Amino acid sequence: MTTQMFGAPIRRKEDPRLVTGGGRYLDDLGHDALAAAFVRSPHAHARIVDIDASEAIEVEGVVGIYVHEDLPGRVGEPLPLLIPHPTLTHGRTGYALAKDEVNHVGEPIVMVVATDRYIAEDACQRIRVTYDTLPVVVGIEAARSGELLVHDDVPDNVAAHMLQEVGDVDAAMAAAPHTLTLDLDIERSACMPMEGKGVYARWDRDRDELRMYSSTQTSTGVRAAVAAKLGLPLAKVECIAPDVGGGFGVKIVHPWPEEVLVPWAAILLGRPVKWAEDRREHFISAAHERGQLQQVTVGFDDEGHLLALDVKLWHDNGAYTPYGIIVPIITSTQLLGPYKPGTYRCEFWSLYTNTVLVTPYRGAGRPQGCFAMERTMDAIADELGLDRAEVRSRNFILPAEMPWDHGLLFQDGRPLKYDSGDFPASLAKLKQLVGWDDFADYRRQAEAEGRKVGLGIGCYVEGTGVGPYEGGHIQIETSGRVNVSTGLTSQGQGHETVFAQIVAQELGVRMEDVFVTTGDTRKMAYAVGTFASRAAVMSGSAIALAARNVRAKALRIAADALEVSPEDLEIVEGTVRVKGAPATSMSLGTVSVLSNPLRYAFDEAAQAATQFAGTFDPDKPPVADDEEPGLEGKDFYSPTQATFANGMHAAIVETDPVTAEIRILRYCVIHDCGTMINPMIVEGQVHGGVAQGVGGALYERMAYDESGQLLNASFMDFLMPYASEVPTIEADHLETPSPLNPLGIKGAGEAGCIPVSAVIASAIEDAEGFPITRMPISPYDLWELRRRHADGEIPSLHRLSRTSSKEPTA
Amino acid sequence: MTDTTSETLHDVTVSVNGVRHSATVPARRLLSDFLRHDLELTGTHVGCEHGVCGACTVLVDGAPMRSCLMFAVTAQDHAITTVEGLCSAPDARVAPTGESMNPVQQAFAECHGLQCGFCTPGFLTTVTAYLDENPSPTSEQAREAISGNLCRCTGYQNIVKSVLRAAEIRAERAGSDVTTEEQA
């Protein structure tokens, strides 16, 4: 039997290339290309009165300067609203170059194309734009008040208002023995991939064909959008995602203005054009996420069972809504986590502000939902004097209750129905890992030393692997080389490796013979993209199905040639052989030769497939009626619904009694993403997710002033965690296979970051003894909370007024 | 394409990965752009262009420097090592294995010390120089050594592991060199 590949911590196929400087990211391509640069709005809200480029046009090396008026037809029309929704009654999108008005700092107004980027930026600096500034809406409170409007024709700044209710919340709330209301606040952060966006386009004027490269999470999406914008036949547009230096969500949005303008200019000028986003551009003209205000009212019984959950969310969607209202929909549905809410109502308002637009960032609304739910669980535990893990456990959906239908519609428009999961087992593992039941002793010890420590917990469920579909194509060459392609893209998830593991396992070939291509519309034209932790589930399943097809074909051909039954054959390390008689065999390369009847021999192997070689049945055609030439197979995977992964995290933090500095002493993760293809890669995903979660919990925020200027638009001022800020992560796994797909897998990409803000808030609250309702939290914030608590403005937790803490219960 | 800039150009001669390059560049040409776009050594990446992220770190006479904070002209007569120069493979795009990678490269590949790989060249150069001076760091020292470089994918845990593993590989290779010499 071939060495087990599926499930093993195989080293990545990508890495030898990437560690030796062999990666090819967007700006590593196109050394002969012209460079584009943009004049972007310095104002958050203004009318454009005049654009004077007369001085800029004199700069030597400038090739073209373009404003909105120059954009023909659909290039000048608003960018598409990618995900319409019936409740998104006032969806608005921007233009590739601003038309008359700008709605956030950073919105592109003028594109300059020049012989190099330095010159293009020189020219940008000489362009004088005259503005009439308009009143600015910054922050959710300002947007919600509706006093000032972002878009004149959007009353109260409300892009969407949505309500979902399951059961009679009002009646259940009225009857509940206990109720609590929490007001919560989460600030903005952003994906911040190390590589910004970028686009490079070449126009082949001999063939009227466009080839473009984009640092994107969806090359098929970009291709279709650009073809539509530029009025090109789809067949004349190719889009390739080269190596991509991180995405985390921001690169799923498409087409970005530059993805339309750069190819347009390349065609117009008949010369290759490239734009690579710089860091400031990424801060002010890509996308942010997270910002929400939340109000949770919960009704529960004496044992802490949820009876009614009534949630209101005010979501800041920034200036435009090209990605629809996916983020607040996810918050409002995934908020429920592993729990049965009794009855549930969630109402949200998605609001415009004069800030950078908001689109999914790893977790995509779930960190906010988890924060709301987990803060609520801690509040219930405190109210009743119960152990926080116990309250959670009492509300769990149990394995025997799976599949569990919440009665809500999820982000894909399909029912929110959990397929599997063992939450009690996850919690038991987590308590064991972090030493939940021993924490009281640890706290006493620490207190005796004058230290403040706290233990926090957070649980989540994550819908992963949403549709509509992905495909896989596999072709085996006569050399035995196995070419695999899938259309979704890669940004560091190790797809070349995990998809090769699936193929190696399913086909019975060696890892080193498998070569995976992702994100290239020339190789696979049908695909959706890499988001929602869907690549392994969707493309992994499609590739597995395709491999099974190829395997069946290989066995058919080999059985014919070896004059045995296909059932008697096996494939081991690339050789088809008779079970129990391995000497009777042929390589898959030879099978590939036989699969393609030839007239012409181009090498020795090919001779075997030519028309005068060997014997054949003269009554049969060389290619059977229901076969195709070539040892190839293709399949698509399209599930009826998402598969639901879950996890539980716990952390121990220490807060400095004097400086209010917050240190994470331990961070523990139990993660269940079903069957793992490569545990090493899953763990890497968890590590990275937790690190981003730590950034969001303690350091990262978008500091807008009241005029809509982003004050911290650089890595000096936006505090992304370095190694010194990220704790060592202790991770353990549970594998509850998904019943929904052929491999039993669930997504893992976003998991790590989802509960981190909830966990850290829980731990700080536990250390300090007063509620934490706003994240991220800096030492200054904590210091200020301590002051307000000392002044009686913030109540203490109930547990402090009890004679002895009931937590933890043994 | 004709040269249409009116900027004053300067002659610069820099040794990059052991090869002398002479070029004529504007004074403001960043060393990072010079390496990437003039010499087409694109292994060095640019993540922020203000010296914070460390992706563009190269070795200047063996010491790690941020190439986005240096001008090409200031590299005159200095010896630069980029990620392409850390290994002995003739062409980095032909995936090298084992001994053709330097110990740090090999360790990152073994320990899953990278995901998207964009920040990685800066870590590799930084760690290579660090281990030259600190051949056997503790885990805490390894973490400290990399805490000037940003990575958005890995959470750093496997990078710390990679630093420690690289130290081991260095020691292993030094040991085997000694053995070879003894045999000879």
Image: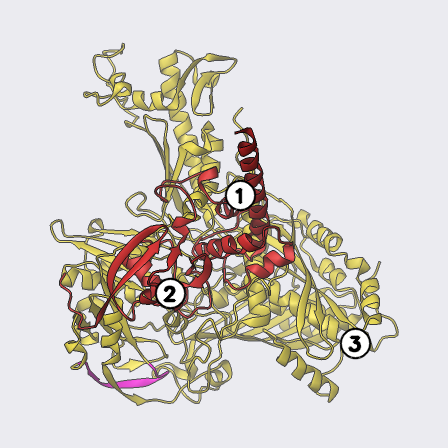
Query: In whole angstroms, how far apart are the C-alphas of marks 1 and 3?
Result: 50 Å
Amino acid type of disc 1?
Glu
Q: How crowded is mark 1: few (under 14 residues within 10 Å), some or many (20 or more)?
A: many
Give residue B52's position: percent from left, percent from top.
46, 68
Disc sitting over residue A798 in the figure: 3
Q: Residues within 10 Å of mark 2 (few under 14, many from 20)?
A: some
Output the chain of dot 3. A
Hey, which quadrant is residue A61 in on the image? bottom left
Q: Colour of chain B?
A: red
Q: Is A700 part of what is drawn in magenta? A: no
Chain letter, yellow: A
Q: Is mark 2 on a helix, strand or loop?
A: loop
Tell me if A632 is positioned left or right of A569 in this view: left
User: Can you say which quadrant of the picture contains the N terminus of chain A?
Assistant: top right
According to the picture, the residue beneath numbered tag 1 turns out to be B110
Inspect the magenta stretch and tell me whether residue A48 lies in it.
yes
- Residue B103 lies, in percent from the top left, at 51, 45
Which amino acid, mark 2?
A: Pro
Q: For the magenta stretch, what is the residue range?
A: A42-53
Residue sitting farthest toward the right: A803
Q: What separation in Å lies between label 3 and label 2 (alpha carbons)? A: 46 Å
Identify the element where label 1 is drawn: helix
Report the amino acid beneath label 3: His
Element assignment for label 3: helix
Q: CB under 8 Å between callouts 3 and 2?
A: no
For disc 2, the marked residue is A84
> Closer to the camera: disc 3 or disc 2?
3
A556 left or right, relative to A667: left
Q: Position of residue A81 (x, y in %)?
A: 34, 66
